[in-house]
Image (cartoon, rainbow, N blue to C red):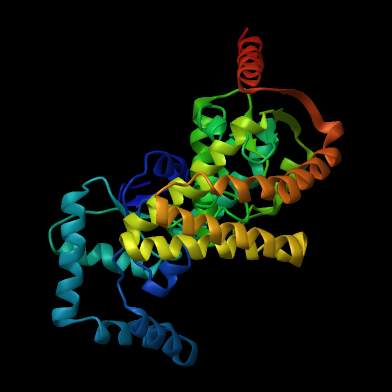
Amino acid sequence: MSRQIIAPAEYREIFLSDRPLVDLRAPVEFAKGAFPASTNLPLMNDSERQKVGTCYKEHGQAAAIELGHSLVKGKIKAARIQAWLDFFSAHPDANLYCFRGGLRSQLTQQWIREAGLEVPYIQGGYKAMRQYLIDTIDNTPQQQQLLILSGITGSGKTEFILSRSESVDLEGTANHRGSSFGKNVTPQPSQINFENSLARELLRHQERQESCLLLEDESFLIGRRAIPKVFFSAMQQAQVLVLEEPLEARLPRLLDEYVHKMQRGFEQHYGAEEGMAVFGAYLRQSVEGIRKRLGHQQTDQLLQLVDSSLQTQLQRNTTEQHLEWISLLLEKYYDPMYQYQLEKKAERIIFRGDRQAIHQWLDERRSNRSE
């Protein structure tokens, strides 16, 4: 196929290489979901797209095309062509796409060509590439053995996941730590963007040719983002490794995660005074989020301890008192919930141990598979 058109056979390389992409769809389309390396430089803005779409429904394609040309002309057309030229000048290897790889791609390519530059567009457009990524997620469990890393709250599962090349970090991809206290300073991606990024990470994992795919034990929802159903179903059937960690190691880790890192993040984002206020609100909202499951009495007790800890922190510049409510949170909520969930996974557990033991188990497994 001509290099003026990028064939579907190249989708994999596009995503693996993070090739720069120009998304010609309207901003409202782009906001719902886009690809990780894409930049929105639309042929039509939201208003223009709506008018053309209405015209297409009422009067057909020819009338819609004519209206589109009348809306995007003169200085508007020149400014958009210049924006494309600037982008492709900075990214010579970039490609462009619209929703289906149809008229918007072809017209944009023609205008750029008339301005003296040859740029390829992607056959099938966003719709076909998006389907490719969905298929990548759904097919992965059939192509790669999944292993699930479970462990009690504060055992350092995410740290462990990040240290292994066999793994894909679901929480990092969803920008949420997967618990009631898992919110980050920056917002989660849209559901579509989460799925697109997950598919890209799975493609990268395939390229590494690992002996398994190691994933952290997650609920169906990571914050407000859902793990794709086929993939999650496979996770629920996969064998489980249990990371064991004593309470004395878990508490300082959670103090750092819930308090130090979050306070620092909010203050960097909002400034010292407002950041501290937002940090306090984050802790209270996180506790309120488990009220139904924890009960009113224990939730109110936790909230009192949180408020007292925040007050002490402001007065004495120390965070040690936060360990009181974190300890109570583990005792009354997280640890009982974990034990209940682990009992349901009992038949799937194939190994348990501390981080060194699990590292050794995985290393030996990899070595045995490569022989």
Residue placed at 25% from the left, 54% from the top? 119
Q: Quadrant of the C terminus?
A: top right
| Position in image of residue 271 (x %, y %) | 30, 61
Position of 30 relative to 2 (above/below): below
Q: Residue furthest top?
A: 371
Q: Quadrant of residue 61?
A: bottom left
Q: Is residue 155 left or right of residue 119?
A: right
| Position in image of residue 55 (x %, y %) | 42, 90
Residues 250 and 177: in front is: 250
Q: Quadrant of residue 234?
A: top right
Residues 85 and 351: in front is: 351
Residue placed at 28% from the left, 49% from the top? 94
Q: Is residue 226 left or right of residue 41?
A: right
| Position in image of residue 184 (x %, y %) | 48, 55
Q: Is residue 188 among what the camera can see?
A: no
Q: Is residue 229 among what the camera can see?
A: yes
Q: Residue furthest bottom?
A: 58
Residue placed at 43% from the left, 68% from the top? 31
Residue placed at 61% from the left, 35% from the top? 250
Residues 323 and 371: in front is: 323
Position of 199 relative to 309 (above/below): above
Q: Is residue 113 left or right of residue 144?
A: left
| Position in image of residue 256 (x %, y %) | 49, 42
